Image (cartoon, rainbow, N blue to C red):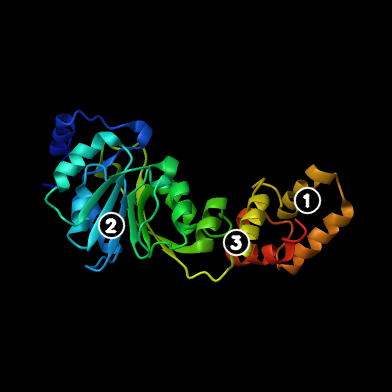
Amino acid sequence: MTLTNKDILKEALDNYSITPKKSLGQNFVIDKNVIKKICDCADLSKEDQVLEIGPGTGALTLSLAEKVTHVTAIEKDRRLMPLLLDLTKETKNISVVHSDILDFSIPFKKYKVIANLPYYVTSPIIKKFLEEYFPPEMLVLTVQREVAERIIAKPPKMSLLSVSVQFYADAKIISHISKNSFWPPPSIESSIIKITPKKNSFDKAFKEDFFRILRKGFSHPRKQILTNFQLDREKKSGVDFTKREIICNLIKKSNVDARKRPESLNIDQWKSLTKNLSKII
């Protein structure tokens, strides 16, 4: 029995003496249509290995298990383990593991990640998987709508988050989700987002330089790009007008207007800035 009915879900939680924790962002999916959308957009098949983050009460877990070869469900809240183990004990292709996903070592090379993520861990979890030696084939995530829209943003609304994700992957919003699709209902709307890692050919050194340049470029998001790079140098060595001119020329060489704000630059411009500025900044 899947816990997609609010009254049945509340009764089950009461039976295990569980009260949803706001601090863990526990808003359990109770809408079967949302579960179907998540499964559909993940393009699941019987050959797939799925890593589910935060199975909660297992409603999505059981649906996933019907479609794939195996589901590894990682649950941080120890209180939910008895409920999950009882719910899945007769389903042989589900493994429930008590762990913090940020500390979990991925045991397979080919897999898909599916999760209903609380806001406070969205960015660290996405970063973890996109930087894995063996990244997932895709991530299908339920996140705060505002975060989803930031991830897929284009100039002139880029952010450190959107550039970071889009460096590694293609991302698109599949659907927006009503608050009433969860219990307890969250205070904000959510979205299903699909993130598909690219086959990235950049070496480790370039990636390190890229994110170093990116962080400096976004150090003051409302300032001009030239000012951000120059401010970084001034903190170390005082105003150096010769260096300022050199930086300005290298920015121009990157086909970037030095007066632009970082939110106005696209991924290719950040890559070009990395190639031209990494040795001086």
Residue 12 image-quadrant placement: top left
Mark-to-mark CA distance, 2 and 3: 31 Å
Rendered position, 251 above or below 104: below
- 27 relative position to 276: left or right: left
Q: Are marks 3 and 1 in contact (CB under 8 Å)?
A: no
Q: Residue at x 47, y 47 (%)?
A: 124
**Residue under numbered circle 1:** 230
Identify residue type, mark 2. Ile
Image position of 175 (left or right of 91):
right
What is the crowding at mark 3: few (fewer than 14 residues within 10 Å), some, or many (at least 20)? some
Q: Quick one: label 2 or label 1, which is nearer the N terminus?
A: 2
Q: Position of residue 85 (x, y in %)?
A: 18, 43
From the viewer's perspective, is 274 left or right of 64?
A: right
Provide residue 11's location: percent of width, then percent of height. Answer: 13, 33
The residue where tag 2 is placed is 38
In the image, 45 versus 144, the foreground residue is 45
In the image, what residue occupies the spot 60% across and 61% down? 207
**Which residue is under mark 3?**
207
Around disc 1, counting alpha carbons within 10 Å, would you say few (fewer than 14), some (14 to 19), or many (20 or more)?
Answer: many
**In which quarter of the view is residue 263 placed?**
bottom right
Helix, strand or loop for disc 3: helix
The vertical placement of 251 against 261, above or below, is below
Of label 3 and label 1, which has the lower sequence position? Answer: 3
Locate residue 95, reporting x and y percent. Answer: 24, 51
Q: Nearer the viewer, residue 222 or 77?
A: 77
The three-letter amino acid code for the residue at tag 1 is Gln
Observer-nearest of 239 and 86 = 86
- Tag 2, which secondary structure? helix
- Residues at discs 2 and 3 in contact (Cβ within 8 Å): no
SS at mark 1 in the image: helix
